[in-house]
Amino acid sequence: MIGRAVLFSSARNGGSDDWKTPKKVLKAVRRIAPIALDPCSTRGNPTRAQVYWYQKGLLKNWSLVAYSGLVFVNPPYSRCADWIAKIISETNNPANRRKIAVVALVPSRTDQPWYQRSMETAQLVCFVKGRLRFIGATNGAPFPSTLFYWGPNARKAILPLTSLGATMPINHHDPKKGPLCVLLPMYAQSGAV
C-alpha cells in the first residue's frame, strides 16, 4: 500500500500532484466541447487544449482564452480548494462578456468544504464509476473521483459525462436564502434530457 498511499496523497505529505488525466475522461469532456484552456497543465499532459498554462493559472483571467470551447481543470489535488474557488469566481464573474464553461476532475472528498461548495455552485455532477487510472500510474487511484460542470449548457454535457458514471443536474434554489442543492436524476435513455 505504500506506493498507492504516496502516489495519490497530498503533495504536502510527500506525494505527487503531477498526474495526467485518463484518456477516457478527456474523450468524454471533448464530446461536450473542444478544450480551449487547461489552466493547470503539466508538460506532456494529453488534454490537447488550445491554450495551456503551466504556471499562474489561478491568477489569470480565463474568459480571455475560453471563447472557443471549455476550460478543463484537473487541479493539483493538494490545492483543490484554491482551484474550486477560482472556478466559481470565473463562472460567476459579471465582467465576463460571455459565460464560460468549466469541467473539473477532482477526488470525491465529500467532507471537504471545497467539495460542498462545488455541489452548491455547479450545474452538473458526475460520480465516476470505479477508480480512475491516471496516465503514468501503475494502479488505479485509491479514491473515487467526481467531475463537476459549471456553465451555460448543462443539457449538452449530461450525455457525454454519463459514459463515465452517474451524472445528474443540480438544481440550485434562491441563493439569498442560503445554499440548498437538490440532485435531480436525469436518465438519458428515458428522453428526459
Image: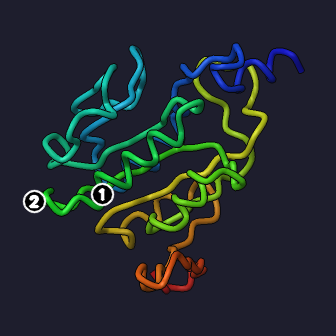
Residue 75: x %, y % from top left: 48, 34
Q: Residue at x 57, y 66 (%)?
A: 167
Under circle 1, the secondary element is helix
Q: Which residue, given by chain and number where applicable, does mark 2 sit on?
A: 97
Q: Which residue, given by chain and number where applicable, does mark 1 sit on?
A: 91
Mark 1 crowdedness (10 Å alpha carbons): few <14, some 14-19, many ≥20: many
State the count of labels. 2
Residue 121 lies in quadrant: bottom left
Do the residues bearing badges 1 and 2 touch, measured as CB atoms within 8 Å?
A: no
Residue 26: x %, y % from top left: 45, 40
Viewer-closest of 74 and 186:
74
Viewer-closest of 81 and 42:
81
Q: Amino acid at mark 1?
A: Thr
Q: Is residue 11 above or below residue 185?
A: above
Q: Residue at x 57, y 22 (%)?
A: 17
Q: Residue furthest left?
A: 97
Q: Is residue 69 above or below residue 16?
A: below
Q: Is 192 left, or right, of 107 in this rendering?
A: left
Q: Is 186 left, or right, of 42 in this rendering?
A: right
Residue 119: x %, y % from top left: 55, 64
Q: Is residue 143 above or below residue 2?
A: below
Residue 115: x %, y % from top left: 59, 54
Please identify the quadrant where the N terminus is shown: top right
Please identify the quadrant where the C terminus is shown: bottom left
Q: Residue at x 47, y 79 (%)?
A: 172
Viewer-closest of 62 and 51:
62
Residue 136 lies in quadrant: top right
- Is tag 1's residue or tag 2's residue first in the polypeptide sequence? 1
Viewer-closest of 74 and 81:
81
